[in-house]
Amino acid sequence: MRLLLVEDHTELAEWVSKALVQAGYAVDVMRRGDHADHALLTQPYDLVVLDLSLPGLDGLEVLRRLRGREATKNTPVIILTARGATEDRVKGLNLGADDYLPKPFELTELEARIKALLRRAGNLVPTVRIGRLEFDLGSRLATVDGKPLSLTPRELAVLEALIARQGRPLAREALFEKVFSFDEEARPEAIEIYVHRLRKKLEGSGAVVTTLRGLGYLIGEAGGD
């Protein structure tokens, strides 16, 4: 899943971004509201974590514009607010924010709220089963015959993106955008490495990732139509 983190405090942004990347998300970081607004015009995101006190354009205006566009009106948004800033929280929720988190906060709580909103936004069942592979969409845990499947963060991100599109192919470029952030030096061809590694780890599980020429990648049950 690709997330947009909008936070002007450099150390906080780096701390949160690093943790979310380690959790398997692709994260773009913007430190100005106007830059975030431009990013939302050009790149689809699965969720936005939005601070309200921003240079260039304040967070409430970023939220208002996001909700006013057809392409982003349903994008989940968690707003970050200073503890006790009740008025800002109320304004954010009235403008369509899905959740808020007062600063300072625990990363585990932020990650839990992100998972809950992503699950709700996708209207996904808690667990997906493909062959003997099970993927819990809440905990983001993959198991085969009940045993955890050892995946790197990027392999996990590839699997999650493919499962979210189960039954429909996902183009290589779209998969790349789910796995890599703006500031990472990588080309779309790099996604093939992680697809190959995931295929190796899925061997014998009954779940396979196939390549559909001109359409992208598709996950399904081995031997299925």
Image (cartoon, rainbow, N blue to C red):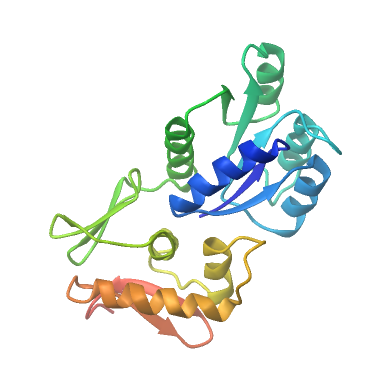
Residue 105 picture location, percent across and down: 52, 26
Disc count in the image?
Answer: 0
Give residue 201's quadrant in the image.
bottom left
Residue 75 seen by the camera = no
Residue 73 picture location, percent across and down: 67, 43
Give residue 207's quadrant in the image.
bottom left
Q: Is residue 105 above or below residue 111?
A: above
Point out the residue furthest to the front here.
11
Residue 191 picture location, percent across and down: 50, 75
Q: Is residue 210 above or below residue 15?
A: below
Residue 176 seen by the camera = yes
Quadrant containing the C terminus is bottom left
Residue placed most toward the observer, 35 or 72: 35
Q: Tell me: 182 left or right of 61.
A: left
Residue placed most toward the observer, 62 or 125: 62
Residue placed most toward the observer, 125 or 180: 180
Residue at image position (44%, 60%) is: 157
Q: Is residue 27 above or below residue 155?
A: above
Point out the residue furthest to the right here.
56
Residue at image position (56%, 41%) is: 15
